[in-house]
Image (spheres, grey):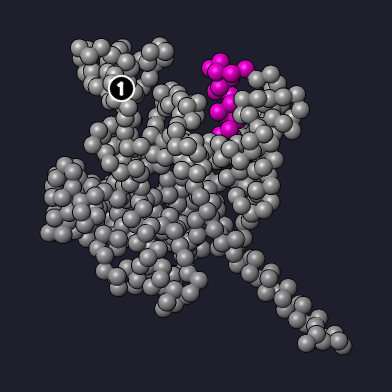
Amino acid sequence: MSQACKRVIPQLVLTTLAHPLDDDAHCVQLPNGTEYFVRPTRDIVPGTRPSGRHSLGDGRFNLFPIVLGPDGSPWAEAVVYLLARLETASSISMATYWAAAEDLAAFRRFLDETPSLDWVSFPIHKSQRPTYRYNGHLKIAVQAGEVSVTTARRRMSSVIAFYRWLAEEGVFKPENSPWTESDRFVYLEDSKGIKFSRKITCTDVSIKVSKQDDPYEGVIEDGGKLRPLTVGEQEWLLEALISVGNTEMTLIHLLGMVTGARIQSILTFRVCHVMRSPEDLQQVEHRIPIGPGTGIDTKRDKRLVLHVPFWLYQRLHVYAQSERARNRRARASGGNVPDQYLFLSRNGTPFYETKEKRSQFDENLKIRHVKAGQAVRMFMTERIIPYIREIYDPKFSYRFHDTRATFGMNMTDQQLSLVAAGHITLYEAREFVKVRMGHDSSAVTDRYLQFRNKINYVRNVQYCYGQHLQELMRASSGDIV
């Protein structure tokens, strides 16, 4: 290993030194022949650690990230910092800690490449302190196009959080401050329109990001920049899915396009959610509750209801009982049971693991990543996008969550046509779209309602201005060839 990096280990079990005769004690043998005994710390005092701190976990973690130095040994302070954050977290999302570990590994690489710096030394001159030097390094990297502004900001924020923890825990006390702090107040507004202020602490080593949204770039900000597919692109997508002939991927895309569900919700559908006979349902749509307590994940654990059209529910019901689906469930962990994931790979592997599953310790885990829809995205990249580019548009591209924006725009267009016909009011159309999309704020819904007008406006301005310039050129005595 030539430089510092992040690695993910399948399991981490916290242990403490033990007597050979203690319960759960097991022997650890080092390469040099040295032996010692350890046992899990969770058996010392349930729910606590030797430090006395309360922990919601039991000292066992899957997919724990560690930061390794250039010689392959763990960076002790960084690893303990990540572990401390995990032990005090109210809920655990390993992706958060992977990002923090990656940021600290980047900081460690900078330190290793700058031997004149001591990461715990903060002399009187700011230019010789590691935090200020790293701040300058990140700014130069942004200007050179080596990293994005948002990545630089996140990396600097991770380093600030790391040093703050070191100071709070008394690991070290710098002779001079790592940065200069100042308090500011930001004014916010919640989903109900209630305004409030919040005090934040800023530092002079934070990377400032000046963000300006472009309302005419053809995307909608809805938990990310989503691009609604045009009617033509929707037809291309369906043609590609049918041509490729993968049943699971076709049904997954259809659920996104006709319900607006996010990928984590679609891929955590269970067999039991589509087992009711279509004959027992209304012939319009079937409503499926999703969120905590349903077995289907949602963003930020929101309780929502998906409105699945009757024709699509019929296909899901038939698929769940097909031999193809039963064979996949037979190979899956847990077997062919009603609570099994509806969509599985050929080998019975889930495409997405629920938050509940991720929080459970698996001592047999071998992989070093979380199942989070990677197979779906790979299918899109390797099969769907090339098909459409070859036949229709060589520049075509899309992301799965664009199907959510596509659903939102299709529904918005339909509602606005009812408004134009005088059947409903604009307020009623807005509330309908808001509920079906699961928006907390009406401001997000308004982005869908205003999308068409903004796109048409900017295109009209560009066309008129282009025509104006063309007329000026024609009237000019000195035409440019």
Magenta stretch: includes residue 156: yes
On the image, which quarter does residue 199 sit in? top right
Residue at point 47%, 37% (across, down)? 71
Tell which of 400 and 394 is nearer to you: 394
Q: How many marks?
A: 1
Residue at point 21%, 18% (across, down)? 24
Residue 31 in the figure: left or right of residue 422: left
Residue 198: in sight, yes or no? no
> Residue 351: horizontal and vertical position, in percent?
30, 50
Residue at point 46%, 29% (across, down)? 79
Which residue is labeled 1 in the image?
34
On the image, which quarter does residue 165 sit in? top right
> Residue 160: horizontal and vertical position, in percent?
60, 30
Magenta stretch: includes residue 89: no
> Residue 150: horizontal and vertical position, in percent?
59, 45
* Magenta span main SS: helix
What is the residue that sits farthest to the right in this orientation?
A: 477
Q: Which residues are magenta?
A: 154-173
Tell which of 279 and 39 is nearer to you: 39
Q: Is residue 8 above or below residue 232?
A: above
> Residue 153: horizontal and vertical position, in percent?
61, 41
Q: Amino acid at mark 1?
A: Thr
Tell which of 374 and 13 is nearer to you: 13
On the image, which quarter does residue 334 sit in? top left
